[in-house]
Amino acid sequence: MTQTRTITVEPLGVTVQCAPDQNILDACLRQGVNVPHACTHGTCGTCKVEILDGDVDLGDASVFALLDSERTEGKALICTATPRSDVTIEADIEEEDGVTYHPVRDFSATVASIEDCARETRRVLLDLDGDIEFNPGQYVQVTIPGAGVTRSWSMANPPGQPRRIELQIKRTPGGLGTDGWVFKSLAVGDTVQVSGPFGRFFLREARDEPAILIGGGTGLAPLKAMVRHALETGSQQRLHLYHGVRTQADLYDLEFFQDLQKLFPDQFSYRPVLSDEEVAGIRTGFVTDAVDADFDTCRDHVAYLCGPPVMVDAALKMLMSKRLFPRDIYREDFFDASDKAGGVRSPLIRTG
Ligand SMILES: Cc1cc2nc3c(=O)[nH]c(=O)nc-3n(C[C@H](O)[C@H](O)[C@H](O)COP(=O)(O)OP(=O)(O)OC[C@H]3O[C@@H](n4cnc5c(N)ncnc54)[C@H](O)[C@@H]3O)c2cc1C
Ligand code: FES
């Protein structure tokens, strides 16, 4: 039997057991210790901690997210670091009122359906072998068969649908998980390994200010989970959903959201925006410009931004110029392997 290591998490003073080949974040999240994290692949720097005692292998941390000087100072990214001894870490833990975190669990899933829902975009429904408890907006990690690596995809289903999860996946040319698997050989009936929930990008149900939700491409997925959850559970929160894509062929779930808008005309609005094509009845321009034009001020709102990092950055700058404070903005960046290799700046705004 492999000997586990004891990880002490300060300032909480709690301990978790971690296998030598397991990353420390994974051990914490499975044992109910919710330390800050976002990408879980060594790219964003959100999970950076100080190693107070003991020895770790830093793993595949991006050289941009964990600088040489920080490595020398004894810092680590716990989503890639594995323990070489018992270890004590100091994490930047912030308790949030009204938030329940659900431990990460493993699931075996069967592919129930695969649909080409937009250009280069697939909706994949997976039936899990147990219920997954999560907050609306969180994501799962899916193991790429034979590759020994995982990819992160957000759940577009609300927590009220815990057995069948919906993923919306965009093809990345040359990408291992999409081009090399989901768009190539994945088939209905296949068995897939899934773990979750991960991430701190989810609907803050304790906050009732009007919400501005901005999604780029498949960044719509977690926002769909949030909107569905709020409307299906009787929340009275005002929700403004913006979906930015390049052309009409990239749009999906148009009718779904238009129908919701008809059902909840005073509570929910839906605005698709095309950046590269003019189509009658659909707005043209950058999605951030559409929000900018619709709101004189965003003060006293809360915002959820998700999609390509460039779009997320542009959206948060626009919202801040409209008087929305960083504490009122939540973001999820869809980082991939090229972001990790190319370098990612520390986010200005929290990732959860
Ligand atoms: C929290 C989170 C949630 C996400 N949710 C979603 C979602 O709901 N839907 C969705 O579509 N996506 C989502 N993503 C993105 C998703 O996880 C994948 O990154 C994406 O699907 C691409 O995966 P891939 O394996 O096909 O590409 P990868 O193998 O990661 O490759 C991506 C690109 O990088 C290039 N590349 C690979 N290695 C290198 C290198 N060393 N140097 C330079 N370039 C390199 C590849 O050629 C390719 O063009 C999410 C990401 C995160 C972090
Ligand atoms: S969560 Fe560890 S670097 Fe992003």
Image (spheres, helix red, strand yellow):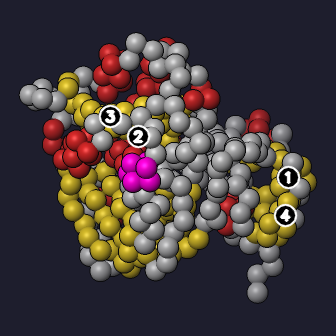
Q: How many marks?
A: 4
Q: Is residue 233 magenta?
A: yes
Q: CA distance from mark 2 to mark 3?
A: 27 Å
Classed neighbour count for the residue bearing mark 2: other residues with Cα under 10 Å, few (<14), some (14–19), many (≥20): many
Q: Which residue: 32% across, 34% down?
A: 266
Secondary structure at numbered mark 4: strand
Q: Most prominent secondary structure in the magenta stretch? A: helix
The residue mark sitting in front, 2 or 3, is 3
- Of marks 1 and 3, which one's residue comes earlier in the chain? 1
Q: Any mark on residue 266, and which?
A: 3
Task: Give yes or no for contact between labels 1 and 2 (Cβ–Cβ under 8 Å).
Answer: no
Instruction: Give the residue pinned by disc 4.
Output: 15
The residue mark sitting in front, 1 or 4, is 1
Instruction: Give the residue pinned by disc 1.
Output: 12
Q: CA distance from mark 1 to mark 2?
A: 33 Å
Q: CA distance from mark 2 to mark 4?
A: 35 Å
Q: Is residue 178 left or right of residue 342?
A: left
What's the magenta region? 228-234
- Of marks 2 and 3, which one's residue comes earlier in the chain? 3
Q: Which residue: 46% across, 45% down?
A: 235
The residue mark sitting in front, 1 or 2, is 1
Classed neighbour count for the residue bearing mark 1: other residues with Cα under 10 Å, few (<14), some (14–19), many (≥20): few
Q: Position of residue 190 (x, y in %)?
A: 33, 79
Classed neighbour count for the residue bearing mark 4: other residues with Cα under 10 Å, few (<14), some (14–19), many (≥20): some
Q: CA distance from mark 1 to mark 4?
A: 9 Å
Instruction: Give the residue pinned by disc 2.
Output: 307
Q: Which residue: 27% across, 32% down?
A: 271
In the image as oriented, which residue stretches furthest toward the left?
280
Amino acid identity at mark 4: Thr
Asked whether 207 or 129 is in front, the reply is 207
